[in-house]
Image: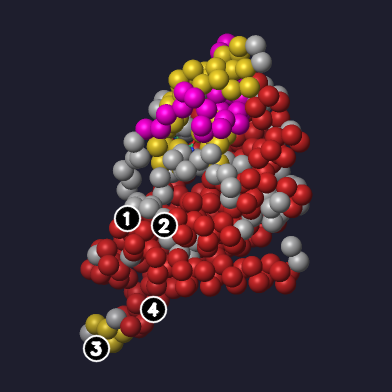
Amino acid sequence: MDAETFGLFRSTIRRFVDERLIPAEDAVEEADAVPDAIVNEMREMGLFGISVPEEYGGLGCTMSEEAALIRELTRASVVFRSVIGTTLGIGSQGIVIDGTEAQKREWLPKFASGAAIASFCLTEPEAGSDAASLRTAAVRDGDTYRITGTKRFITNATRANVFTLMARTEPDVKGAGGISAFILPADTPGITLGKPDKKMGQKGSVTTDVILDDVVVPAANIIGDVPGRGFKTAMKVLDRGRIHIAAVALGMCDRLIEMSLAYAMERKQFGDRIANFQLVQAMLADMKVDMLTTEALLQSVAAKFDAGEAVSLECSALKLHASEAVGRIADRAVQIYGGAGYMAEYKVERFYRDVRLLRIYEGTTQIQLTIIAKQMIRQAGA
Ligand SMILES: Cc1cc2nc3c(=O)[nH]c(=O)nc-3n(C[C@H](O)[C@H](O)[C@H](O)COP(=O)(O)OP(=O)(O)OC[C@H]3O[C@@H](n4cnc5c(N)ncnc54)[C@H](O)[C@@H]3O)c2cc1C
């Protein structure tokens, strides 16, 4: 995208956020659902196609461009982003990165237009952080596989037309090597969904179990047509996803700082606006520092990613820093608002709950730390 077109697209998203999404936040929280009309508007704007290459009908944004657009979008409740998040990220990128040409031609144009929604099924009841221990079994039967197992906490499962699903095709290979990634249409017989989970926050985004009972899928649906490579595909998808999650965090940092500053300038105590008290100023300044360090790291990691550098360690460091930073910022926002910060009407308590998730999914903070340290040790040659 040339700079002018990109700038225009970005301002369109900014207007959409200010005029359409922010005013709809309370209704979404109340109904625990994003209205279809808003989903359709997002579809018409091309938001589902941000990450799909142009040759398959998408906008073909670089990671730096995607991050800038997602930051813009997540100045509104992160729940709106979650509608498109799995389709432009973890649900589709396995096919973009490792899919065969036929798989790309079949699915990517549908993702780009928003005609098909994709979800990502890795986590299981007994396999979360230790995803390589997953048990969902795919047993070869002629030209097909028969898949049985349960996937847990799957975002957008209720909306999905297709799942990128990780299952064990080689039962004798215990770890990552025995896992394959399947493209599994959601209407395949044998798939049922659990009840939507009741969550701490992010009301309006849906997660459920995906239960697979002897689901028959063609062997040709293995991503890249290469069995045993699924875990590697999942890890590549997650590296990229961590940059995306950092952009989500950054959008919320912007919003929380904007709100906190406005409140501190308006609220008066002891005959003065609270923004004039140095202890409140310290909270505002700490928020800004957390935002700026996240912004700088995000821009640098996304640029390296776009240049094709190996940035797995940096992606983990970025996801960790951004998700912890927005957590600190949300906590300070509640504090600056005082009692109002605890009240639903003022929204910061909602954002505080919403951003808590960022430290947990797509690899917890502890898992990012272990990834960083293991790579440091490997690089040191030990
Ligand atoms: C709202 C929501 C949406 C989600 N969406 C999806 C989705 O779309 N698709 C999908 O596949 N998954 C999804 N997940 C699952 C998510 O990725 C996992 O919850 C996450 O990876 C953590 O796994 P777990 O919940 O099993 O926690 P556990 O792995 O049981 O971890 C529990 C605690 O132990 C710590 N821990 C675990 N191992 C170590 C270790 N080696 N060293 C140090 N500490 C460790 C963890 O950091 C954590 O603090 C979602 C989860 C939520 C809550």
Mark on residue 31?
1
Farthest-out residue, bottom: 271
Residue at mark 2? 35
Rounded to the nearest angstrom, the CA distance separating label 1 from label 2 is 9 Å
Q: Residues within 10 Å of mark 3 (few under 14, many from 20)?
A: few
> Residues in magenta?
166-194
Instruction: Check whether the beta carbons of the residues at disc 1 and disc 2 lie within 8 A of each other.
Output: yes
Quadrant of res 194: top left
Q: Nearer the viewer, residue 226 or 67?
A: 226
Q: Residues within 10 Å of mark 2 (few under 14, many from 20)?
A: some
**Could you tell me which secondary element the residue under label 1 belongs to?**
helix
Type of residue at label 3? Gly
Q: Nearer the viewer, residue 210 or 317?
A: 210
Mark on residue 271?
3
Quadrant of res 372: top right
Residue at mark 1: C-beta within 8 A of ligand 1: no
**Could you tell me which secondary element the residue under label 4 belongs to?**
helix
Quadrant of res 301: bottom right
